[in-house]
Structure formats: structure tokens, C-alpha cells
Image (cartoon, grey):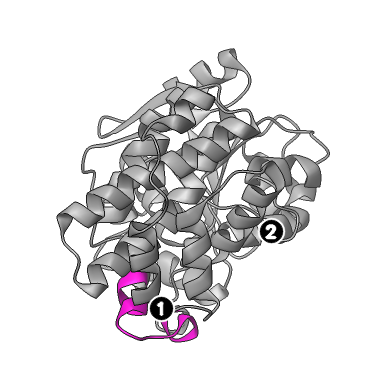
Amino acid sequence: MHMGIIGAGGWGSALAVSYANAGWKVTIWAHNVETASEINERHTNCNYLPGVDFPHNIKATASFEFLQEEKIVLLMTPAQHIRSVVKEAKQFFDPEAVIVHGAKGIERGSLKRISEVIKEETAGAFPVLVLSGPTHSEEVARQMPTACVLAGNNQLLLKEMQNQLMLPSFRIYTSEDVIGVEIGGSLKNVMAIATGIADGIGYGDNAKGALVTRGLAEMAKLGVRMGANPLTFAGLSGMGDLIATCTSSHSRNRQAGIALAQGKSLNDIQNSSKMVVEGAFTASAAYKLGLKYEVELPIVREVVAVLEGLKSPAEIAGLLMTREAQEELNYLLQS
């Protein structure tokens, strides 16, 4: 068994380690030669997955030529880089390749979901599946129990890929709701910034519980308007990922929210780490999607205001708690 992984960040590296430990032959593409050399020579990736030893059956490269021999391609680069990476890599894809992407974001400018971006760039020549859920790379790489969801439109292919990719510590469920899975995975990062702001201000668990729950409502409202199944947001790519990202110390988006509340600028936060804070890029795209589909997204809106320097973190915390009273589950009743 062998696979190709595009992206040697934390998520791509964690999957490479997991499948290599299970006996797969893994080739992973790194954006820079230095990262590829470190993986090949020292069997580590200190910038993106520190403290983890890489098995020797992982080969790293900075060229896409290896893709010509791969039937399974895991595309694990940040959402805003997907289009440029696919544009460069697509000429090397095996005609029978299945692409599984794990990016959690919405493309700025086009407002497209990532599976739409991939299909657009490849003219629909390859099946595209989505891997999402509460999957912190630090835990996946150490074979800590993890469950995720694999979404796609072809049930037979989903079942085949589920059987191939399932590992003892990496349980995979399937879903045919691609829209719901992608919207949940994207917006949960924005909600994690909001809960991080609440934590940084000094609010307690009650406020966090409220933000997580109302964040779930916003995710579901937008997703349902776009054609998603509302029940998807009660699953791993919705509530599951939202809880993990809004409460974990591993969450870059939550940590970014805490830093914003402490007075740090977005530029300082982004420059302090090589890891990407996806929610900072997705927030404005999600807000524009809300305008497009006429869905009110107050948490998203206020996070955008902080990220753009229009409001302070303390201001938005108060505004979110003083909104007009309404029925709690009206978004489900309307859907």
C-alpha cells in the first residue's frame, strides 16, 4: 500500500507518520527543500510537528513528479494555497487518482468551498473527497484515538476509501453531505477565534458554552441555506470539531483569539509561527457568504471587525451578549 501526501505541515505530516507506522509506503511533498531534507535525513519535522520521529518508509520531496504513481492523494495544504498547488500539481496526477483534501477554509475572493476549487482547477477529472473532524495533528501523529468523517458524492467510492484509510487509532465515518462537512470544518475555526477572545478577556465557562452553542447555530444556518443537511452539524465535522477547536490548547485559532484579546495584532500573531491560522482568512469569506445567502452571522461579523481593527476584543464580547432576544432553535425550525 502506498500513497502520496501534498503538504508537509502539521496535518499532512501527522497523516504521513500514521500511515507509515501502519506499513504504508508514503511520499510527502514539502513546499521547501529544507523541510524535505530534514524529513529524509533526520526523520523529523521540527517546525510543523515537533517531538515526533518519522518512520523511515516516509520519503519527502519538493517535486510533484511522484504523483504519477499514486492512486491515493491526500491534499493537506492550507485552504488559501489549494488553488495554486493544484494548478501546479495537476499535470502529474495519475488518471485514476482519488483526491482526499483536508483543508478547512473558504477561498477568499471566489467564496468557493475547497472541493469546488479542486474540481474547477482539474476540470472535474478526479473524484474529490473531504476529510474533516476533530483531528489535532499532535494527537493523530502519536496514535491517540481519533474519529473523523470522509465526505463525497459516490457512496461506493466512500466505502472503498473508508476501508483502505481506516487505522486502529484513526476511525473514519462517511457522509454524502459534502457542503455540510466543508462548511462545518471552515466556520469552526472562526468560532475558535471568538472563544479564544472570550478566554483572553477572562470570561468563564458559561460564556464559552454560549459561544460554542451559538457558533454551531451560525454554522448550521449558513450550511442549511447552502443546501447542507442540518443533522451534519451535530456530527464530527460540526459539533465534534467545534468542541475540540474551541477548547484545546492545540488550537491555533483559539490561541490567536487569546493573543488578540491580550492586545497583539494579527500580523504579530501570524509572524510568530509558521503554522497558518485558517480562521483569520476564512472569517471575511464566511461573512461575505452570509451576505450572499442572506444569513445573519453575528459571531463571524464581530470576529471580522476585530481582525480588521474596527473593534476591540472587549467591544465585541459585550455586543454578542446584548443582541436582540430570540427563540433558541429558530434556525432549525426555519430550515
Residue lying furthest front in this view? 324
**Residue 176 horizontal/vertical position (percent):** 55, 21
Q: Earlier in the sequence, mark 2 or mark 1?
A: 2
| In this picture, residue 330 sits left or right of residue 208 | right
Residue 32 rendering spot, x and y as whole percentages: 57, 73
Q: CA distance from mark 2 to mark 1?
A: 21 Å
Relative to 161, say whether 285 is above or below.
Answer: below
Q: Which mark is residue 237?
A: none
Instruction: Name the amino acid, label 2.
Output: Val
Q: Is residue 174 above or below residue 33?
A: above
Image quadrant for the C terminus? top right
Q: Secondary structure at mark 2?
A: helix
* CB within 8 Å, label 2 to label 1: no
Q: Would you say residue 124 is visible in this rendering? A: yes
Residue shown at the point (72%, 56%) measured from the top left = 83
Could you say which is closer to the camera, residue 301 or residue 200? 301
Tell me if mark 2 has few (under 14), some (14-19) or many (20+) residues whose alpha carbon lies within 10 angstroms of its own.
some
Q: Which residues are magenta?
A: 257-269
- Across and down, in percent, residue 172 comes to 38, 28
Q: Is residue 102 magenta?
A: no
Seen at 63% across and 28% down, the residue is: 227
Residue 37 appears at what percent x and percent y? 48, 72
Local packing at callout 1 (Cα closer than 10 Å; few below 14, some 14-19, many 20+) is: few
* SS assignment for the magenta stretch, majority: helix
The answer to whether any part of residue 20 appears in the image is: no
Residue 315 sits in quarter: bottom left
Could you say which disc has been placed on residue 273 in the image? 1
Q: Residue visible at 54% across and 41% down? A: 183
| Badge 1 element | loop
Name the residue rendered at 36%, 54% in the picture: 56
